[in-house]
Image (cartoon, rainbow, N blue to C red):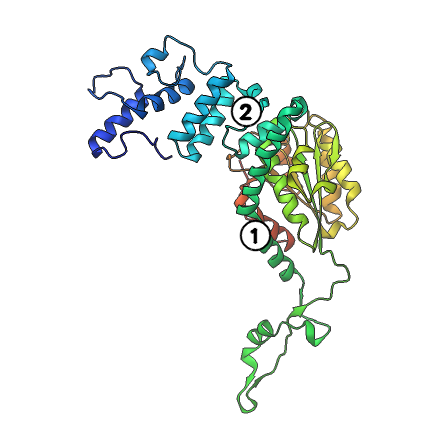
Amino acid sequence: MNGPRGSGGTAPPGQERLRRWRLVLGGADDGTGTGLTGDDVRIDAALGALYDIQGGEPGQDRATAARGGGLGASAPRVARWLGDIRTYFPVSVVQVMQKDAIERLGLTRLLLEPEMLDAVEPDVHLAGTLLSLNRVMPDEARESARAVVRKVTTDLERRLAQRTRAAVSGALNRASRTSRPRRPADIDWNRTIRANLRNYVPEHHTVVPERLTGYARKQQAVARDVILCLDQSGSMASSVVYAGVFGAVLASVRSLRTSVVAFDTAVVDLTDKLADPVEVLFGTQLGGGTDINRAIAYCQRLITRPASTILILISDLFEGGDSGELLRRIADLTAAGTQVITLLALSDDGAPGYDHDIAAALAGLGVPAFACTPDAFGDLMAAAIERRALPAQPIG
């Protein structure tokens, strides 16, 4: 993590180390003989307001802050603090501090105020928090919230879309290869020549192709059906944001028929919103209960070509419905040829808490359950399309 951008940036290395220790320990005299001056005082106050027990006002050192409250519930005070951390810390650190402030200081309700949303640094965790507030958000804050979420999804698409499309398109092309191309136009000549080099006839300066490699003429324009089934429980917020983006990306690949289904104790089909990931995300209702069985039952009705269908369940598997019936449904799906994959998380947050018993039962059915980072999702989809071993390692 990068350090704060304060007044000690050009200090000699020894003095800079002392300065950083003073910022870690606080502004009170600690015997180092190094005081905080200039911007360092405001940096110290910004850190203290969040991480000290009692925090402080911007402009106070932590010894003074101990006599007063931290950020409290004052929107102007929080807005000043947000401005300070954006001034003195890099974006990656600002995002961590915002997340900590929401979790540690209970500032969630202040995000319902438009002026606050204009001051924050958009990121995946903040987008997830805003989506969880969707049902209680006042109208005047809604457009600001949508702007924050749109910036997050736009940044994610810019980072992930091209790589995902390339991985999926390559897998679809490889999956369509055949050793019996029907027409000369269907032959992949480069691969055919490489596969038959041992059959080169020097006197004729040619290769005799014993085995052809080419592309099958598809009877259907759609090669695979993909269903993303999203758990809307509060713990899955980051995964839902990423899944909304990936749903829109996959929907843009012509050879895929993509559906997105979100669920808590109810089920909502968001497929008609896939042209815009923001619409997908605001169609979710984060924070409810969980009935995975009901969601899988709905997805079952969408499947018309089991052998060409990939069903990705994104859930921590804490089932509030009938877990026995859920496992029976998934067993029926896999027996019919549907590929079922369970992602315990689709995020950069690391291994989540999840129901180990259901995960183990799924593994017994040949359905692995593992966490997947967004950067690995394209490779996961490629492996699923080609029915290769999945690249991720199961948890636990």
**Element at label 2:** helix
Q: Amino acid at mark 2?
A: Glu
From the viewer's perspective, is 57 left or right of 346?
Answer: left
Q: Nearer the viewer, residue 126 or 259?
A: 126
Name the residue at the bottom extreme.
203
Residue at which label 2 appears: 115
Percent from the top left, x then y, of residue 209? 62, 79
Q: Amino acid at mark 1?
A: Gln
Residue at which label 1 appears: 162
Query: 201 above or below 166?
Result: below
**Element at label 1:** helix
Q: Decide: few, some or many residues near mark 1? Use Cα within 10 Å; few <14, some 14-19, many ≥20.
A: few
Residue occupying image coordinates x 68% and y 37%: 279
**Marks 1 and 2, the one that precedes in the sequence:** 2
Q: Quadrant of the N terminus?
A: top left
Percent from the top left, x then y, of residue 62? 34, 15
Question: In the image, which is nearer the foreground, mark 1 or mark 2?
Answer: 2
Percent from the top left, x then y, of residue 91? 44, 35
Examine the rendering and report whether any part of residue 355 can be seen. no
